[in-house]
Image (cartoon, rainbow, N blue to C red):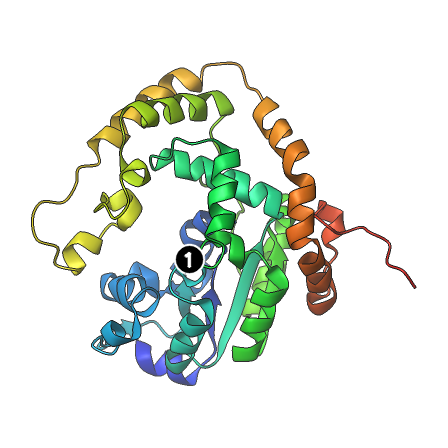
Amino acid sequence: MRDLLSVLQEEPSFLHVGFPKCASSFFENRYFLECNGFFNVIEDPQWNSFLEYQMLTAQASLFRRSQVPSDILVPFDLLVGASSATFLTGIDYELSLKRWKKIAPNSRVLIVVRNQLDFIYSGYGQRILSGYFRSVDEHIRELIWDVQRSVWGRLFYDQIFQITKNVFDDVLVLPLERMTRGDEYITELNSFFGVDNRAKNNVVRPSLNENTLRLIRGANWAFRHGIGSPQMSILPSYEGGIERFRVNGVPGKEPSGNRRRVINRLAKSVGQRMPQTRRGKKRYLEQNKNLFEDWFGESNRRLEKAADLNLSEYHYVGTGIKQEP
């Protein structure tokens, strides 16, 4: 057995920073496992609390009071590191990387990206599961209004890649869409991290159909909960973080998640039996394609050059356009 902190300081390690809605559940629950040659510090309760509620989300005055967990031992044959989409959803991304580098200076960093059109639509469905009740058009308007802090401002993939390269030397960008190639995707991951395993790229959390989401959204409008609550509300654990209420020592009783469980369970029992439809997704794509190209097309073309990728193969917005000589 080896001391975890010493391993992170002195030996190569792995770091998967997300994006969220880019197979993060697969990586955390299927790939970065001990049986595949990894030790994901997120699985340790002390490290999980430190990363999620201190290093990746705490402002400087609070973070300075925190301590890195110690006295944890790991087996000799495992590559140690972290897999957490909070790197790209918490406090400033560059600051999170610099904080992590002080702990693990030799990290090999994986960034998984996704066509921005699909990314936002998938995230919209996740928002509905957490209590959102407005339309996807209003969701986009809200993201753009809050672009300085929302995920919209983090979808300039070329900038995310460059920020990461400025902090770490070994950075791999992989399109989520490449996972359809099966073993080839896993082989590329194994080669990058220097491991040898036979992980399977099974879908961990398949998307719900449009009818189910429509039913949940309607119920969210009638029975407000989660992110459908008024601004500055203390949220249940499914949105605020499983341990946030306890870790932050919030006085009083934690909000119940029962309303969400009842709404989602009943809607799924009805909606998943209804005929499948993609009319909503088709309308969304037709209506917003030009908007997304205006925002992210140039960024995607720059990423193709910087990371030696062919994003036009997966129809990323703004790619596949012939450049002027």
- Tell which residue pokes out farthest to the bottom in this image: 10
- Residue 92 visible in the snapshot: yes
Q: Residue at x 27, y 38 (%)?
A: 229
Which quadrant is home to the C terminus?
Answer: bottom right
Counting from the top left corner in percent of width and height, residue 142 is at 46, 44
Residue 313 against residue 170 in the figure, above or below: above
Q: Residue at x 55, y 19 (%)?
A: 276
Badge 1 density bin: few <14, some 14–19, many ≥20, Cα 10 Å: some
Which quadrant is home to the N terminus?
Answer: bottom left
Counting from the top left corner in percent of width and height, residue 286 is at 68, 32
Counting from the top left corner in percent of width and height, residue 75 is at 34, 71
Residue 84 against residue 126 in the figure, above or below: below
Q: Is residue 228 left or right of residue 188?
A: left
Q: Residue at x 23, y 65 (%)?
A: 46
Residue type highlighted by circle 1: Thr
- Tell which residue pokes out farthest to the front in this image: 145
Picture quadrant where residue 98 is located:
bottom left
Residue 71 against residue 51 in the figure, above or below: below
Q: Is residue 246 left or right of residue 237?
A: left
Where does label 1 land, which residue?
A: 89
